Amino acid sequence: MAKVSAEQLGSEPIGQLLVKQAVPASIGILVMSLNVLVDSIFVGNWIGAIAIAAINVVLPVSFFIGALGMAIGIGGSSIISRALGSNNYQKATLVFGNQITLTLFITVSMALLGLYYVDVLIPAFGGKGGIFEPAKAYYIIVLYGIPFLAFSMMGNTVIRAEGKPKFAMVAMIIPSIANLVLDYVFIYWFDWGMKGAAWATTGGYIFCFLYISYFFASGHSELKLSWKSLALQIPIVREIGSLGVVTLARQATTSVVYLIMNNILFGLGGESLVAVYGIIGRMQMFALFPVFGVTQGFLPIAGFNYGAKKYQRVRESINTAIRYASLLAALVFIGLMVFPQEIASLFLSDSADQYAENLAVNAYVLDHIPLAMRLVFGATPIIALQLIGAAYFQAIGKAVPAFLLTLTRQGFFFIPLILTLPFFLDELGVWLSFFAADVLATIVTGLYLRKEIKNTLQLPQSS
């Protein structure tokens, strides 16, 4: 049965297959996004808006280390999808074993370095003034759980590459539910403040790690590990790295963006403006979950069929994924444009027992959020083309264009814009940079993808 599940990627109708792959992925991402959203709501209401700013400072460091696992996972899973498409199960298993060894070694080492340089990294990422102490308390505890997160992110991509999206969905739901329950216990009942929020997050990572370990150990997976497969092989590591660097570059660039943004915003409006970006960041994770779900569902379909040389199905998967994701993105766009202030108010407490300082921060956030949210999400209806286009090249193993297109939005356009526009337009320049970068990156990706389809995917389909 497991083998048939993988082979269905090359035989079922694309529209039906994409729904089967994307819906569980979307649900999983939705639950994870809701976890981040509700977690921020709990923190904002029970601790304060400054706590949201503190978490926003920690995220780029912790997510970068966790993203090492995702980079290894997606890089290896692209190879696994194509290996399964060509019935090379031996290579698929060897790649998975190398993924495990790489993930454990690299992320544990990085977490230890992150803990050693804690007092340097937090201020560098904008954790200054009243943000520093809560950010440090949160950061130290969360880094304990980062290796568990990294393994979970790696394992989840492999599960999806095997054509088992429901298991991948459950793996994403478990830590989210665990985190929310632990949030209530540690923050509300035990009154642990930022430490409670951090332990809840770390606990969620550990629960996810346990479930994914169960999946691979209990016979649900097609990949049967041996001690030999865990031994690193240079050609395999090089291939994983060449594709995984795309994901790593994306997250590294995101971390640099957080560093720049937090420092620029702190200079323009102090802790309060950093809190505005904290809410915007949470909404970026949550609002686009259906688009990310379609993208995740698209990856194994494109990779498998490309490996099987079924180019007509690859073309169809690209077109279908863009259509589905664009429709969902347009619906998200309407909600964000109409209700920005109402959305922001969910993160803030108006209780009379709040300190005057917290109430002042809340008022500032509500005043500044509408313009920020409308500009940041202004290009949402067209963003699907950008995401699907970059994902396609990663799925088929073309590392260089995947790498360049991944860097296009944040590296080539956003960072130069954010370093320039605020000098002329102040806060408006910050938010306008998001919109301009999305539009420019989508144009470039669309042109490159069109050229690729014309030159490569018009080849005769093999029998």
Image: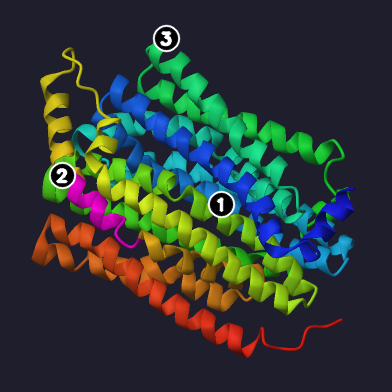
Q: Tell me if residue 148 comes above or below residue 452 in the rendering.
A: above
- Nearest to N terminus: mark 2 or mark 1: 1
Q: Which residue is mark 3?
A: 189
Q: Position of residue 8 (x, y in %)?
A: 81, 58
In this image, 175 relative to 263: left or right?
right
44 magenta-colored: no
Q: Is the Cβ of the residue at disc 3 closer than 8 Å to that at disc 1?
A: no
Residues under labels 2 and 1: Cα distance? 30 Å
Q: Give the magenta range.
A: 370-379
Q: Which residue is mark 1?
A: 293
Task: Assign the magenta stretch its main secondary structure.
Answer: helix
Q: Is residue 101 visible?
A: no
- Nearest to N terminus: mark 2 or mark 3: 3
> Toward the viewer: 161 or 62?
161
Q: Which quarter shows the C terminus?
A: bottom right
Residues under labels 3 and 1: Cα distance? 34 Å
Q: Which residue is mark 2?
A: 368
Residues under labels 2 and 3: Cα distance? 33 Å
Q: Is the Cβ of the residue at disc 2 closer than 8 Å to that at disc 3?
A: no
Q: Which mark is residue 360?
A: none
